[in-house]
Image (cartoon, grey):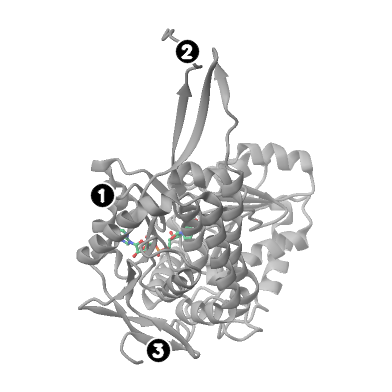
């Protein structure tokens, strides 16, 4: 590593912040470690209040110019960012995999193309954002979408660039300027995004990237008086701290949080499809907010479902995520592995049975685990594990299935496997969830609202909902010429 540059598979990544169009170092650093083999990748700038203040100041200074930039020009630059992402898909994919341990083949073929799409989608949607003028007793009402101002975006490590750009793209499209703080366990691709945005012609200060531990730099960002929006994806406890920090200034918040989503398997389902959907929940080593980690299976098919599930799940290949044939990679960090194992050990001590897995493996890997004989009010059923750990419970009636499905403090998503359309509609309507998938999983169109109910979040992202959040909507009412009546 030359000073401030680390290299991952030949790709150079600047380890400093990106503030006001310049690279800025910090006196302190933290070590970024690859979950694949525990090797140190390099030292990353460790920002604090001073870097937060500098980044918000840069975003504030750049805001009037970017907000006044015509929509078509903003859209053109965002398409140029998408072009830059597409040119560097291979580089982004290998850097992300090395940094967070998710599969290289997913990054190459699914995730990074979606990152480019995030920019294209919001650039195009921006150009459709209009509300027809309407009249009130001869007066015209004109609704405008005014950019809100500097926006702080804070993101997690499980899908770093994907989740960051779900926020960066609409915030920039709306005319806001941005301070992005990626997670400290996966800081690298955010730095590459800063390079790509600069090459695409995004003016200095419009996108700023600060690195560091949430506890050290977070509060200075979320309590800053010049910040007009905060969008956060991460855990519930951090969201609670951010909400408290933003409360004195009533800074509007968008919160995308955790989940404990159910997969309901009815006896009339195509069982092979149901098993495929269930096994898919081990993707990204279970580190997916939307994962349906609670399998709720109708009693009459539970034995057959379990047999087929075990047959398929035990054939998954766990190993190096850079290998094209790997199905499950490592978990992100030794602390996360310990957390996962703690949940499982407590569940086993409380009487759960591990049908498969139930233990860590060599390195930073956790055996795909299925636990049965779990009580509805137990920790393992109620709390998010964020690892490859599923529980299986059975139900006898549709009402019981709905009651079990809704009985947690979360409400992010729910998946149903059933061959009966009417049942699907009836059950789907009763579930508390931001997204309900029927005989499918993870189909996500950016036009759709995305978010969670209860402790899974506040607000929705996607399509017009993103612009609702990042804009201050204004209605301008104009009297007809010569009109004198104010009544
Ligand atoms: P986390 O809450 O620990 O950290 C998320 C981010 O918040 C990191 O960048 C971290 O540095 C920052 N942070 C920490 N303390 C802060 C503070 N006091 N002020 C400001 N920022 C602070 O979450 P994580 O472990 O990185 O991510 C896993 C969680 O994210 C899971 O609960 C998962 O379900 C959730 N998640 C939700 C979605 C969704 O869309 N709903 C998507 C992915 C992940």
Please give left or right for residue 55 compared with residue 354 in the image. left
Q: Is mark 2 within 8 Å of ligand 1?
A: no
Q: Nearer the viewer, mark 2 or mark 1?
A: 2
Please give left or right for residue 248 compared with residue 310 in the image. left
Mark before the other along the chain sequence, 2 or 1 = 1
The residue pinned by badge 3 equals 39
> Residue at image x 79%, y 56%?
270
Q: Is residue 482 placed above or below 107 in the rendered structure?
A: above
Mark before the other along the chain sequence, 3 or 1 = 3
Q: CA distance from mark 3 to mark 2?
A: 75 Å
> Residue at image x 48%, y 67%?
201
Q: Can you see residue 23?
A: yes
The numbered disc on residue 245 is 1
Please give left or right for residue 168 compared with residue 48 in the image. right
Q: Can you see residue 409?
A: no
Task: Give the x, y percent position of residue 413.
Answer: 57, 50
Q: Is residue 362 placed above or below 286 in the rendered structure?
A: below
Q: Quadrant of ligand 1?
A: bottom left
Q: Nearer the viewer, mark 3 or mark 2?
A: 2
Q: Residues within 10 Å of mark 1 (few under 14, many from 20)?
A: some
For numbered disc 2, what is the local secondary structure?
Answer: loop
Q: Is residue 242 placed above or below 82 in the rendered structure?
A: above
Task: Give the x, y percent position of residue 341.
Answer: 43, 72
Q: Nearer the viewer, mark 3 or mark 1?
A: 1
Q: Is mark 1 within 8 Å of ligand 1?
A: yes
The residue pinned by badge 2 equals 482
């Amino acid at each position: 590593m030359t000073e401030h540059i680390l290299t991952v598979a030949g790709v150079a990544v600047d380890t400093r912040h990106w503030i006001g169009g310049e690279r800025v170092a910090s006196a302190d650093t933290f070590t970024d470690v690859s979950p694949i083999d525990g090797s140190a990748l390099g030292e990353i700038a460790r920002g604090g209040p001073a870097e937060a203040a500098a980044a918000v100041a840069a975003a504030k200074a750049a805001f009037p110019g970017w907000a006044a930039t015509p929509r078509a020009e903003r859209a053109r630059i965002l398409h140029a960012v998408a072009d830059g992402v597409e040119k560097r898909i291979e580089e982004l994919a290998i850097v992300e995999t090395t940094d967070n341990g998710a599969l290289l083949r997913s990054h190459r073929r699914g995730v990074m193309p979606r990152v480019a799409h995030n920019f294209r989608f919001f650039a195009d949607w921006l150009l459709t954002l209009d509300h027809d003028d309407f009249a009130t007793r001869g007066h015209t009402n004109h609704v405008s979408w005014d950019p809100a101002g500097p926006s702080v975006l804070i993101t997690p490590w499980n899908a770093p660039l994907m989740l960051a750009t779900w926020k960066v793209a609409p915030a920039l499209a709306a005319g806001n300027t941005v301070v992005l703080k990626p997670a400290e366990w996966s800081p690298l691709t955010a730095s590459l995004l800063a390079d790509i945005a600069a090459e695409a012609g995004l003016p200095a200060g419009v996108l700023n990237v600060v690195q560091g531990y949430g506890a050290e730099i977070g509060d200075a960002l979320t309590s800053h008086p010049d910040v007009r929006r905060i969008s956060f994806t991460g855990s519930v406890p951090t969201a609670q701290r951010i909400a408290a920090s933003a409360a004195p200034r009533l800074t509007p918040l968008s919160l995308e949080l955790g989940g404990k989503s159910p997969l309901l398997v009815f006896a009339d389902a195509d069982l092979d499809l149901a098993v495929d959907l269930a096994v898919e929940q081990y993707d990204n080593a279970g580190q997916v907010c939307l994962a349906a980690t609670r399998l709720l299976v109708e009693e009459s098919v539970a034995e057959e479902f379990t047999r087929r599930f075990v047959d398929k799940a035990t054939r998954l290949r766990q190993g190096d995520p850079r290998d094209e044939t790997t199905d499950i990679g490592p978990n992100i960090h030794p602390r996360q592995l310990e957390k996962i194992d703690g949940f499982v050990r407590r569940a086993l001590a409380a009487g759960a049975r591990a049908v498969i897995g139930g233990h860590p493996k060599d390195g930073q890997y956790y055996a795909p685990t299925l636990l049965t004989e779990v009580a509805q009010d137990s920790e393992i059923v109620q709390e998010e594990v964020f690892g490859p750990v599923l529980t299986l419970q059975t139900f006898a009636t549709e009402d019981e299935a709905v009651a079990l499905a809704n009985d947690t403090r979360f409400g992010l998503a729910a998946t149903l496997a059933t061959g009966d359309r009417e049942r699907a509609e009836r059950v789907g309507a009763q579930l508390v969830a931001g997204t309900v998938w029927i005989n499918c999983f993870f189909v996500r169109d950016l036009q759709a609202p995305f978010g969670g109910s209860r402790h899974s979040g506040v607000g929705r992202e996607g399509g017009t909902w993103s612009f609702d959040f990042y804009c201050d909507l204004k209605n301008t009412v104009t009297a007809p010429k010569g009109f004198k009546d104010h009544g």
